[in-house]
Image (cartoon, helix red, strand yellow):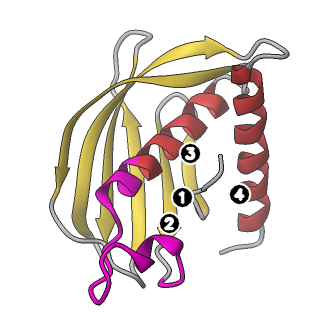
Amino acid sequence: MRFVFVDRLVSAEPRHHIETLKNVSATEDVFADHFPGYPVFPGALVVEAFAQASQLLIGMSHDFAAIGQLSRLSRVAFRRQVRPGDQLWIRCERRPGDEAWVLDASATVEGRRAATATLEYTLEPAQPGTDAARQAERLRALARELQRSTEGVV
């Protein structure tokens, strides 16, 4: 991942849900253009934060032997602008049922809902030498780093 939109792993229950945090900083490159004089974190990047949290959950649930490939994004709704200085709390929860990976995602700022979406994934085995294996290794490294950064946090 070139850009990471997960600053902290708050909690995770493999195969069920994940909660992450993104600190939205005024120094992020995106604010130079979106929008000058009135910076707003783009909705597409909120959706990317959903995707990254979801992919972490899928990877963790399969010991990074498989990754999720986004196959469908639906029911996307934006309810509140996300601005510099905000903490974007992401929760992705897998729908109960069969083996399908359908996740309901929500983002909140100060306890108020900012965005929601439904993400559907197909699983791809992380076979050695494949793009999926490289993606799985990046996700594994991110998960290790996030877990290290939360050790000792009360």
Which residue type does callout 2 highlight?
A: Lys
Q: Which residue, given by chain and number where applicable, does mark 2 sit on?
A: 22
Q: Earlier in the sequence, mark 2 or mark 4?
A: 2
Q: Which residue, given by chain and number where applicable, does mark 1 sit on?
A: 5
Does the CB distance between marks 1 and 2 fall below 8 Å?
yes
Q: Residue at x 15, y 61 (%)?
A: 79
Label 1 – label 2 distance at C-alpha: 6 Å
Q: How many marks?
A: 4
Q: Residue at x 47, y 32 (%)?
A: 16
Q: Which residue, given by chain and number where applicable, does mark 3 sit on?
A: 12
Q: Tell whether position 42 is magenta.
A: yes
Query: Left or right: 126 with respect to 5?
Result: right
Which residue type does callout 3 highlight?
A: Ala
Does the CB distance between marks 4 and 3 fall below 8 Å?
no
**Would you identify the image quadrant in which residue 59 lies?**
top right
The residue range painted magenta reads 26-47
Indicate the secondary structure of the residue bearing disc 2. Answer: strand
Label 2 – label 3 distance at C-alpha: 15 Å
How crowded pointer 3 is (Cα within 10 Å; few <14, some 14-19, many 20+) is rated as: some
Q: Earlier in the sequence, mark 1 or mark 2?
A: 1
